[in-house]
Image (cartoon, rainbow, N blue to C red):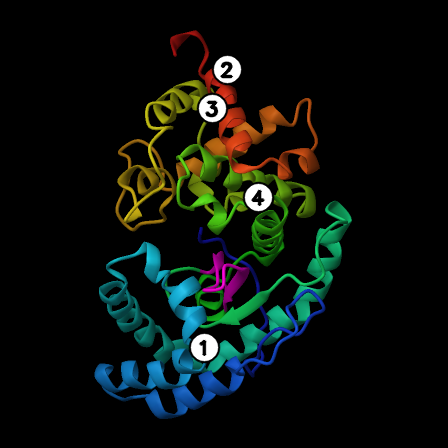
Amino acid sequence: MGRVKHSLRLLGACAVVSTPMMMAASRPSIEGSFEAFWVEARGRSLEDQVRLWDRWIEGPQQDLYASAVWEVRNHPDWKARKARLLEARFADYARVGDQIPGMIRILEKDLPSRLVSFRSLFPDTPTDLAVRVVVAPGFDAKSGVRADGSPVLLLAADSLLLEQANLDVLFPHELFHLYHARHAGILNDGVMPGARLLLPLFVEGLATCVSVRLAPGSTEGQLLLQEDLGAIPEQRLPAIATRFLAEADEPVLDGGPTTAFKRWFNAARTPQQPDLPNRAGYWLGLHVIRALLRDRSLQELASWPPARAEAETQATLVRIAGPRH
């Protein structure tokens, strides 16, 4: 996701968030795992750090890391990606490792009130949604699918700390993805087998509109978690919609995420399109949902199954693109 500054007070101690919204099950303590890891791994060689990571962090919850963190099933190159990301993350820990427990405390403190706020918009939110705090590179927060097929929201405490993430915007956006998975069967933020590029466009636009409702006063750049996305002139909307329509039927997954998906939704370091910021699909999706909300409610859109969501998104893009399409 984006890189937006947010003032966070740093405390100390790492733990799994305790909330009625989480699945009731015993699980390893992230607090204990991270503390044990960092006590042993600080100052050690990369090889030793990876070995200790596998022992203390992933070992107690291998299924969660394989299925939802690394998404082994959808990323054939996950081992190389893990090695690359962990090397960079361990370098970050040299600076902020002692502060990660404080980030967990902030998440623990904030989550119950965030859930109350979310329920004000979606009163039918299930009481057994799973929200898990992890330490992981490569994302700050995301919905994933456990090995048993159940959806889970992951909050990567270390990534959120490093980004100084805007929690006012991030929490409702990510809680919606988890709600959406249970309510409409749209898993992995729309990055699911059989989905076309239209589905994540719809899903990310809808999640951003939830943040519009629950984080009033935020700028468009804040809502999109990336300031340069908020600076795209609205006059470009028809041309960008036309460009997206040329790829709209491309699959999201083909072994791993497709090139078309990465072009519109990846937060890569290198530009994905020469004249648009990365993650431009989030900006376009927001405008698609705004168009749909002119005569429908947010709750109705959230109930559409994947096929309906794709069809309505494509029709809306055609209207936005205008006669040129």
Residue under label 4? 207
Does dot 3 land on a helix, a strand or a loop?
helix
Q: Earlier in the sequence, mark 1 or mark 3?
A: 1
Residue under label 2? 319
Q: Relative to residue 252, is residue 152 drawn left or right?
A: right
Local packing at callout 4 (Cα closer than 10 Å; few below 14, some 14-19, many 20+) is: many
Q: Is residue 149 magenta?
A: yes
Type of amino acid under label 4: Ala
Does dot 1 land on a helix, a strand or a loop?
helix
Residue under label 3? 314
Q: Earlier in the sequence, mark 4 or mark 2?
A: 4
Cα–Cα gap, marks 2 and 1: 47 Å
Residue 78 position in % (x across, y down): 28, 62
Q: Residue at x 58, y 54 (%)?
A: 178
Local packing at callout 2 (Cα closer than 10 Å; few below 14, some 14-19, many 20+) is: some
Cα–Cα gap, marks 2 and 3: 9 Å
Q: Report the residue that reaches farthest toward the top.
A: 323
Type of amino acid under label 3: Gln
> Residues at badges 2 and 3 in contact (C-beta under 8 Å)?
no
Type of amino acid under label 1: Gln
Residue 203 position in % (x across, y down): 52, 40
Magenta range is 140-156
Q: Earlier in the sequence, mark 2 or mark 3?
A: 3
Q: Residue at x 51, y 32 (%)?
A: 307
Does dot 4 land on a helix, a strand or a loop?
helix
Query: Image quarter for residue 159?
Result: bottom left
Type of amino acid under label 2: Arg
